[in-house]
């Protein structure tokens, strides 16, 4: 058998030219892109490192001992991140998600959370602060994150079976580390809403047909018992390194049918505009669902594109702004920050970037019946977060 070779597209090599604003925003006017989508969600990658080597994100063939991560001087400081975030909030952002890599590998990330929690949205409220993690370090960080102001946590977990989970993370981490992290988050009150339900503590499972298909029902049952929201994610064609194959995608509709055969589900209304997951509640014996009851969600960017109301932007570890999870290049905001740009100039740049946004990759891929453009180069998920 010949050795498998994966070519990595280095997103750090170049940045896009920042466009000038197409129109001046009047006081109170909403910033929208070319498809009239507002800017509401900012996802910030705080590190390009991870302690997992999941094959669909950071396979060992690429991210081995010779891989060159970003030097510390190239990474945005907490002060730089906070400054940029404050300007995004002025333009309509309401939610900030910290990602990675694995964000808990960033030293004292709770200090960044505390800094961000002091910011205000246009309406004068604190932004919604959330974090995505594999939870292996959450046991030691949950209380500090809660005290710093973190409100929500999403945990990535793709299997409960020990053999399957260790094979997927590819570094022999036991599933108990993740479950202990989730338990610690619950104990700290992370994700607890005003009604006393853990609606803000979610678990994400990426499903690959030949890898963890048999874990769908065990995962659903486990987190139904734990009364935590579980979201199933269709295996996506992100980046170049995950060897994406349409045959490996398990449509969300299939999973809905599988779970419904054991526990009837009923569709739930979206909680906010631009929500990526379609939510279903486990129906009670009388066919009803009540707030706080267990639920599941489905993120279906392959079979049911949600580009139409996408309101998310992504800031890489080294300060490049990406307007789509499937983008190939980003805008270099770090150069502006470190080049002496004023807040007004930074805001001017962000307005121009968002007004010129035309991204709708998933919708176009769906029109092309699931096929991606041959040779297309896309940013790696580990570089800008999920």
Image (tube, rainbow, N blue to C red):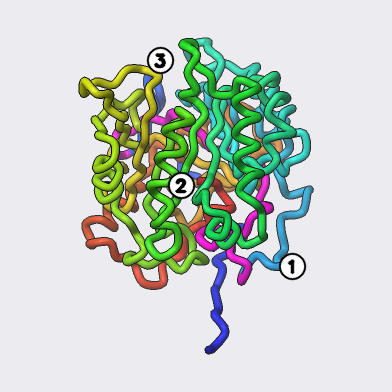
Q: Which mark is residue 161?
A: none
In the image, is residue 62 above or below residue 90? below
Q: Which residue is mark 1?
A: 65
Q: Is residue 26 visible?
A: yes
For the residues labelled 3 and 1, the Cα–Cα distance comes to 50 Å
- Marks 1 and 2: which is nearer the front? 2
Image position, residue 15 (x, y; %): 56, 54
- Please, is residue 44 above or below residue 159 in the view? above
- State the residue position of label 3: 28
Q: Is residue 174 left or right of residue 376?
A: right
Q: Residue 345: give x, y in percent of width and height.
A: 58, 31
> In the rendered structure, does residue 151 fall within the stretch colored magenta?
no
Query: Counting residues from the N terminus, which is met first, the one under dot 2 or under dot 3?
Result: 3
Residue at x-position 54% and y-position 26%: 152
Instruction: Report the Cα–Cα distance between label 1 and label 2.
Output: 27 Å
- Residue 59 x/y as whole percent: 58, 65
Start-end of magenta stretch: 34-61
Q: Secondary structure at mark 3?
A: loop
Residue contact between numbered discs 2 and 3, judged by CB atoms under 8 Å: no
Magenta stretch prevailing secondary structure: loop
Percent x, y of residue 173: 66, 54
Question: Image check: 378 left or right of 172?
Answer: left
Instruction: Provide the secondary structure element on which disc 1 rests.
Output: loop
**Which residue in the protein does label 2 denote?**
205
Q: How many marks?
A: 3
């Amino acid at each position: 058998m010949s050795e498998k070779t994966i070519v990595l597209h280095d997103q750090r090599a170049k940045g896009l030219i920042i466009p000038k604003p197409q129109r001046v925003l009047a006081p109170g006017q909403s910033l929208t892109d070319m498809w009239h989508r507002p800017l509401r969600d900012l996802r910030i990658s705080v590190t390009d490192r991870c302690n997992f080597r999941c094959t669909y994100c950071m396979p060992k063939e690429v991210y081995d001992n010779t891989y060159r991560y970003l030097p510390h001087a190239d990474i945005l400081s907490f002060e730089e991140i906070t400054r940029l975030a404050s300007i995004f909030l002025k333009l309509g952002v309401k939610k900030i998600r910290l990602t990675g890599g694995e964000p808990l590998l960033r030293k004292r990330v709770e200090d960044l959370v505390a800094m961000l929690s002091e910011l205000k949205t246009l309406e004068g409220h604190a932004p919604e602060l959330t974090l995505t993690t594999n939870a292996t370090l959450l046991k030691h960080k949950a209380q500090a994150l809660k005290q710093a102001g973190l409100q929500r946590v999403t945990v990535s977990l793709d299997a409960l079976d020990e053999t399957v989970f260790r094979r997927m993370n590819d570094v022999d981490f036991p599933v108990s580390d993740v479950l202990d992290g989730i338990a610690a988050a619950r104990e700290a009150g992370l994700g607890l809403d005003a009604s006393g339900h853990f609606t803000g503590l979610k678990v994400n499972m990426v499903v690959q047909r030949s890898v963890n298909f048999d874990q769908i029902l065990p995962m659903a049952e486990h987190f139904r018992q734990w009364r935590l929201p579980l979201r199933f994610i269709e295996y996506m064609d992100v980046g170049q390194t995950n060897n994406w194959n349409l045959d490996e995608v398990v449509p969300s509709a299939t999973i809905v049918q599988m779970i419904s055969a054991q526990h009837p589900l009923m569709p739930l209304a979206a909680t906010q505009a631009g929500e990526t997951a379609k939510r279903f509640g486990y129906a009670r014996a009388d066919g009803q669902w009540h707030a706080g009851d267990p639920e599941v969600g489905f993120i279906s960017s392959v079979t049911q594109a949600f580009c139409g109301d996408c309101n998310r932007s992504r800031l890489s570890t080294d300060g490049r702004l990406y307007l789509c999870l499937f983008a190939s290049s980003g805008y270099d905001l770090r150069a502006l920050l470190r080049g002496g740009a004023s807040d007004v100039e930074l805001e001017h740049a962000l307005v121009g970037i968002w007004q010129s946004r035309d991204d709708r990759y998933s919708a176009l891929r769906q029109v092309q019946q699931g096929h991606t453009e041959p040779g297309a180069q896309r940013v790696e998920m580990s570089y800008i977060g999920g």
